[in-house]
Amino acid sequence: MTVRHFLSLLDYTEIEYRRILNRAAALKQAYAAGIRPATLRQRVLGMIFEKASTRTRLSFEAGMAQLGGTAIFLSPRDTQLGRGEPIADSARVMSRMVDAVMIRTKDHAMIEEFAAHSKVPVINALTDLNHPCQLLADVFAFEQNRGSIQGKRVAWIGDGFNMCHSYINAAQVFDFELVIATPPGYEPDAKIVAAAGSRIRLVNTAQEAAKNADLLVTDVWASMGQEEERERRLRDFAGFTINKQVMEHANADALFMHCLPAHRDEEVSAEVMDGAQSIVWEEAEARLHTQKALLEYLILGDVSADLSHPH
């Protein structure tokens, strides 16, 4: 059987994602009830971190433990990858010892090469190109609060970087409208925008993007590896803060999300971040449930196990 990886949201159909998200909802309910179904008992996830993380490591490691499995954390100091072993060789070895591999790295080509030589599913836990795991969580969190995201209007305000690219992919898969506001020179990749067609619209101001939006989303203005550009970016992004005035252009029941960590009073005002329309903490928790469902789907196939008691 051909191994399927999760490198981009475009790797699966909406029907498949609906199965994963429905399973995530069941796992969330079970978690709240104190039930831990051991569906991944004796399974092992290898986690390669070339970029630091709080939420990604916690959610994958805790998720595997809650499903009865084990996760092994590997930093560049812990692997031969950090000492120049060819990516293909590392993939051939690791995939003979674990049931899935999660990679968080800068270079998207690295994760594609690893996947090409892996015998087990490879999960993209962030590259400079995209961040598909976060979008599963974001769609899940939105739909838990507002129902289907199909046909809704989403405003992306900020840098047209990896998170923005994944929102563009999500608009294609889940069929919603995405309005993107970035400063000049920070637009998303033109090819990714073109592939999404009429669902995507690029505008020049935060206010225009927010108009009639059901969801407003942003990310930090200087991502990991861009810290030296911080002062210039603060100047370039002036006027792109999601604050109370920007939120007033959106629908009255619009939600705010941020993948975190957030810099209050830079990309989002403290008032919005900590306000009634913000669901950032629920969004963060959604990483746990959606990734558990994703891991089950990739390792076991479509799962509909009994959640009434631990296995």
Image (cartoon, rainbow, N blue to C red):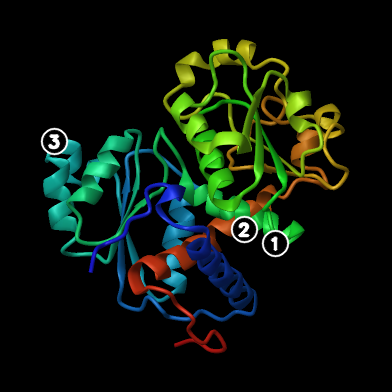
Q: Are marks 3 and 2 in contact (CB under 8 Å)?
A: no
The answer to which quarter of the image holds residue 191 is top left
| Mark 3 vs mark 2, CA separation in Å | 38 Å
Q: Is residue 234 above or below residue 40?
A: above
Q: Quadrant of the C terminus?
A: bottom left
Q: Is residue 282 visible?
A: no
Question: Under tag 1, what secondary structure?
Answer: helix
Q: Residue at point 43% right, 56% down?
A: 12
Drawn side of residue 47 relative to residue 265, left or right: left
Mark 2 falls on what kind of element? helix
Where does residue 15 sit, x and y in percent of width and height?
52, 64
Label 3: few (<14), some (14–19) or many (≥20) C-alpha neighbours in 10 Å: few
Going by the numbered disc 2, the residue's amino acid type is Phe
Where's residue 267, x and y in %? 67, 27
Q: Where does the N terminus fall, quadrant-wise?
A: bottom left
Residue carrying label 3: 84
CA distance separating discs 1 and 3: 44 Å
**Hey, which quadrant is residue 42 in on the image?**
bottom left
Where residue 64 appears, x then y in whole percent?
41, 67
Q: Position of residue 4 (x, y in %)?
A: 31, 60
Mark 2 and mark 1 in contact? Answer it, CB < 8 Å.
Answer: yes
3 vs 2, front mark:
2
Position of 232 with respect to 300 (left or right) is right
Residue visible at 41% across and 79% down? 39
Find disc 1 in the rendering and name its residue: 144
What residue did someone put label 2 on?
140
Q: CA distance from mark 2 to mark 1?
A: 6 Å
